């Protein structure tokens, strides 16, 4: 497997590090192929409870690789479209994913972070969809996921002007879950991932699916969906264990992790 994405296992957590420092982790086809291959393998691996995707201190990813893309024809881009579709399909993965973002998360980099379940950013993080400056628009979900995350006003501002927003603005706007000092980024993301990986896997999957449902449906349908998936959890051993552990004042020992 190419070294454009490095995989490390830390117990039940998998850490994927984007690794093209010479190009600020620009997402070329080699990197995207490697990332998708890792995610495919990890999502089949029951011993993985959560994935953290990160980059370098200077850049999470500065977007799709402009140099690789610039001479492509319409047909070639359509043929490369499988990356867009594979990334969009990741919203259906059961694997919880956290983006740990330091430095630039631009264009496809911002879109990759948004495909993750949530984003933890360092104080130096900068987010943007600058494609307009290149004569194109976001093509891996930016116009849709950014708008759902931050609302129309801010999404239009970012997509139409191409400006970047810093970590504080991104947190205020709802794009980012937490902002932490740079030297605490990985530690914080890994600790959140360890917590998630320690819980009952079927419950984590149910929780993730229920939150994602909010983006696909009406409120009354979503509430109905939540009730339909809430009650069956009482048929699991892990619900019995979680509640017994609380009553007995001990840590739970979930069976299905
Ligand atoms: N692609 C290719 N190379 C890049 C990219 C990129 N996106 N970003 C940076 N690099 C390279 C630079 O060319 C430079 O290489 P070299 O040293 O060989 O010239 C190296 O990385 C370092 O970059 P800079 O010298 O520019 O570093 P600065 O600190 O001066 O600037 C910036 C950092 C502001 C991040 C600047 O590099 C920049 O503006 N980068 C481009 C950001 C951008 O426009 N991103 C959007 C790309 S388009 C996109 O993502 C569309 C996604 C849709 C895909 C759909 C597929 C199906």
Image (cartoon, rainbow, N blue to C red):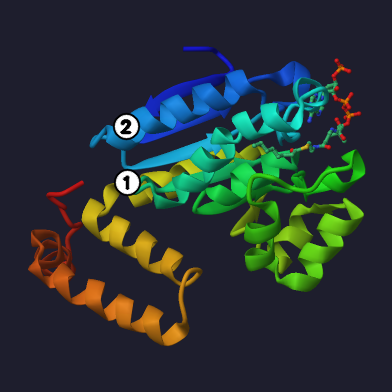
- According to the image, label 1 marks what residue? 197
Farthest residue toward the bottom? 220
Farthest residue toward the front? 75
Using the rendered image of the protein, determine whether residue 8 is visible from the camera's viewpoint: yes
To which quarter of the image does residue 202 belong?
Answer: bottom left
Q: Residues within 10 Å of mark 2 (few under 14, many from 20)?
A: few
Residue 17, image x and y in percent?
56, 27
Instruction: Look at 48% across and 30% down and name the residue there.
Output: 36
Quick check: 2 above or below 46?
Answer: above
How many callouts does the rendering have?
A: 2
Quick check: 227 above or below 110?
Answer: below
Cβ atoms at labels 2 and 1 below 8 Å apart: yes
Instruction: Look at 72% across and 67% down and name the residue there.
Output: 172
The CA span between labels 2 and 1 is 9 Å
**Ligand 1 within 8 Å of the CB at mark 1:** no
Residue 218, image x and y in percent?
47, 81
To which quarter of the image does residue 235 belong?
Answer: bottom left
To which quarter of the image does residue 232 belong?
Answer: bottom left
Kind of element beneath mark 2: loop
Kind of element beneath mark 1: helix
Q: Quadrant of ligand 1?
A: top right
Residue 11, image x and y in percent?
32, 32
Residue 143's disc is none
- According to the image, label 2 marks what residue? 11
Using the rendered image of the protein, determine whether residue 174 is visible from the camera's viewpoint: no
**Ligand 1 within 8 Å of the CB at mark 2:** no
């Amino acid at each position: 497997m190419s070294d454009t994405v490095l995989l490390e296992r830390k117990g039940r957590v998998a850490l994927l590090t984007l690794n093209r420092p010479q190009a600020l982790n620009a997402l070329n086809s080699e990197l995207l192929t490697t990332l998708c291959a890792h995610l495919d393998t990890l999502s089949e691996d029951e011993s993985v409870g959560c994935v953290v995707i990160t980059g370098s201190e200077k850049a999470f990813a500065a977007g799709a690789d402009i140099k690789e893309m610039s001479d492509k024809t319409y047909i070639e881009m359509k043929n490369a479209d499988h990356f867009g579709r594979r990334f969009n399909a990741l919203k259906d993965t059961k694997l919880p994913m956290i983006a740990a973002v330091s430095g630039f998360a631009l264009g496809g980099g911002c879109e990759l972070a948004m495909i993750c379940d949530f984003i933890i950013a360092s104080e130096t993080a900068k987010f943007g969809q600058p494609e307009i400056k290149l004569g194109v628009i976001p093509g891996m979900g930016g116009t849709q996921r950014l708008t759902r995350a931050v609302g129309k006003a801010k999404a239009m501002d970012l997509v139409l002007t191409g400006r970047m927003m810093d970590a504080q603005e991104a947190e205020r706007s709802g794009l980012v879950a937490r902002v932490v000092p740079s030297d605490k980024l990985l530690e914080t993301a890994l600790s959140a991932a360890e917590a998630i990986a320690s819980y009952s896997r079927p419950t984590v999957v149910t929780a993730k699916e229920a939150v994602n449902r909010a983006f696909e449906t009406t409120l009354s349908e979503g509430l109905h969906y939540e009730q339909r998936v809430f009650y069956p959890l009482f048929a699991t051993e892990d619900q019995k264990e979680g509640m017994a552990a609380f009553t007995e004042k001990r840590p739970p020992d979930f069976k299905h992790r």
